[in-house]
């Protein structure tokens, strides 16, 4: 198996002609025969006992070609890609058989490759540092968050519902006079003002009193996930059972004793100041890095294939779905709650995907320009750190993560440090 020829056919598109020798292809045919023979019946032979030559004569010489091609294709392609010295970024490729038979297999593939990248002035990037000063407003904000977390709901029966209240309602939704699936609930708890429902829904509950039954008229967003409801006018029939409001505790020494290890409000504030300062330092450091990488991405000169952004969005959506699953949700449920369809949902990831792709390309190029060469000690330490982080056996980690991929990631880290160390912080 090997690369027969390689040629560029367009920007970031190349064509490989790949050859599989007759010996290798015949081995794959023999493998296909052994896999299929027990299913094949030939007159004069018991089922599963017919010789390969008789089966080929009866059904045609190419009877085992498809399975044989599927067997040798991935290995032949990987070997040819390595020989061509290219990096493939899209698994959507054109495939054409040039020759197949006694002389082996020859096929062509068209595939998308990583772009050529140019970058300069990556040293000396200027960024501005955020202030890390802790103000009284910062401390008051934290205290208010503590109050909110320790608030309790009390029933209200002497006034209509207001924004900020929690209401207990029955509701049923109708579109064109017909009730729709998922549009009905009883004794549902809704926090008015949180934007958890269709735009206009919560606002129309305001002003109604306990025991009232009334209609709400809303229009589903045009990009709503359920296509049958998208852009449709709907009516929700509502019954208001309860109104509750938050009661916030007083911030004093007694309250502080109840919710912390401190005895006085002043002691608690002093501790808050330390923690806020630490957080501000971390945020300022992270902000500086974000500024550096934002500017680094802008320095990239390359004709970047759309497939790179698409692949990154898929990766980001997968990570997002994993986080949702840890909360007992999934992407479909999330989109239903937010009224987004799949296309709109993907669009939300595009700006960050573009930045990440450009930043990665920039750092890969910088690693080459700076001749970054991670040491074996660096590699072993990285393997060890991963094993400890995920509580896995070291040999298992090494079997899952290819050495070449980890070396590339280490090069990216070193290149990142080069850029950050050379940045000018104003």
Image (tube, rainbow, N blue to C red):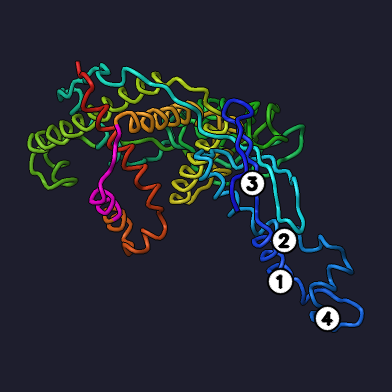
Q: Closer to the camera: disc 4 or disc 3?
A: 3
Query: Viewed as shown, does residue 52 lie left or right of 192?
Result: right
The circle on residue 35 is: 1
**Disc 1 or 3, which lies upstream in sequence?**
3
Which residue is identified by label 2? 67
Tell me if label 4 and label 1 are in contact, CB under 8 Å. no
The verdict on residue 372 being magenta is: yes
Tell me if label 1 and label 2 are in contact, CB under 8 Å. yes
Whole-number angstrom distance, CA of label 4 to CA of label 2: 20 Å
Of 105 and 324, the residue lying toward us: 105
**Disc 2 or 3, which lies upstream in sequence?**
3
Neighbour tally class for label 3: few under 14, some 14-19, many 20 plus, Cα within 10 Å: many
Say which quarter of the image contains residue 211: top right
Seen in the picture, residue 199 relative to 399 is either above or below; the reply is above
Q: Helix or strand or loop: what does disc 2 sit on?
A: helix
Which residue is identified by label 3? 18
Which residue is identified by label 4? 47
Residue 266 location, x and y as percent?
8, 34
């Amino acid at each position: 198996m090997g690369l027969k020829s390689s040629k560029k056919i367009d920007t970031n598109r190349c064509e490989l002609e790949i050859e599989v020798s007759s010996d290798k292809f015949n081995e794959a045919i023999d493998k296909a025969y052994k896999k299929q023979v027990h299913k094949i019946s030939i007159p004069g032979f018991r089922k599963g006992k017919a010789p390969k030559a008789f089966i080929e004569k009866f059904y045609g010489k190419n009877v085992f070609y498809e399975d044989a091609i599927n067997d040798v294709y991935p290995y032949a392609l990987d070997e040819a890609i390595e020989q061509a010295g290219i990096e493939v970024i899209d698994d959507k490729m054109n495939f054409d058989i040039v020759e197949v038979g006694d002389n082996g297999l020859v096929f062509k593939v068209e595939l998308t490759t990583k772009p050529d990248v140019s970058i300069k002035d990556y040293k000396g990037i200027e960024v501005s540092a955020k202030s890390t000063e802790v103000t009284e407003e910062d401390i008051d904000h934290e205290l208010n968050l503590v109050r909110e977390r320790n608030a309790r709901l009390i029933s209200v029966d002497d006034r209509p519902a207001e924004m900020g209240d929690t209401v207990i309602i029955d509701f049923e939704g109708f579109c064109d006079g017909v009730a729709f699936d998922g549009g009905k609930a009883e004794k549902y708890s809704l926090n008015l003002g949180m934007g958890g429902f269709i735009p206009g829904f919560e606002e129309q509950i305001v002003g109604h009193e306990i025991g009232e039954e009334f209609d709400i008229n809303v229009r589903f967003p045009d990009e709503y996930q359920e296509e049958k409801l998208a852009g449709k006018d709907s009516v929700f029939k509502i019954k208001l059972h309860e109104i509750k409001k938050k009661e916030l505790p007083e911030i004093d020494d007694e309250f502080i004793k109840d919710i912390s290890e401190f005895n006085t409000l002043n002691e608690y504030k002093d501790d808050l100041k330390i923690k806020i300062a630490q957080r501000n330092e971390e945020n300022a450091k992270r902000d500086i890095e974000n500024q550096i990488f934002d500017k680094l991405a802008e320095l990239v000169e390359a004709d970047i294939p759309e497939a790179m952004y698409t692949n990154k969005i898929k990766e980001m959506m997968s990570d997002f779905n994993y986080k949702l699953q840890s909360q007992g949700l999934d992407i479909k449920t999330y989109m239903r709650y937010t009224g987004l369809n799949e296309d709109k949902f993907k669009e939300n990831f595009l700006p960050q995907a573009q930045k990440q792709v450009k930043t990665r390309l920039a750092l890969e190029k910088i690693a080459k320009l700076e001749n970054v060469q991670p040491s074996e000690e660096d590699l072993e330490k990285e393997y060890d750190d991963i094993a400890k982080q995920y509580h896995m056996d070291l040999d298992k980690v090494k079997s899952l993560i290819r050495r070449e991929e980890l070396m590339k990631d280490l090069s990216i880290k070193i290149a990142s440090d080069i850029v950050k160390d050379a940045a000018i912080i104003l």
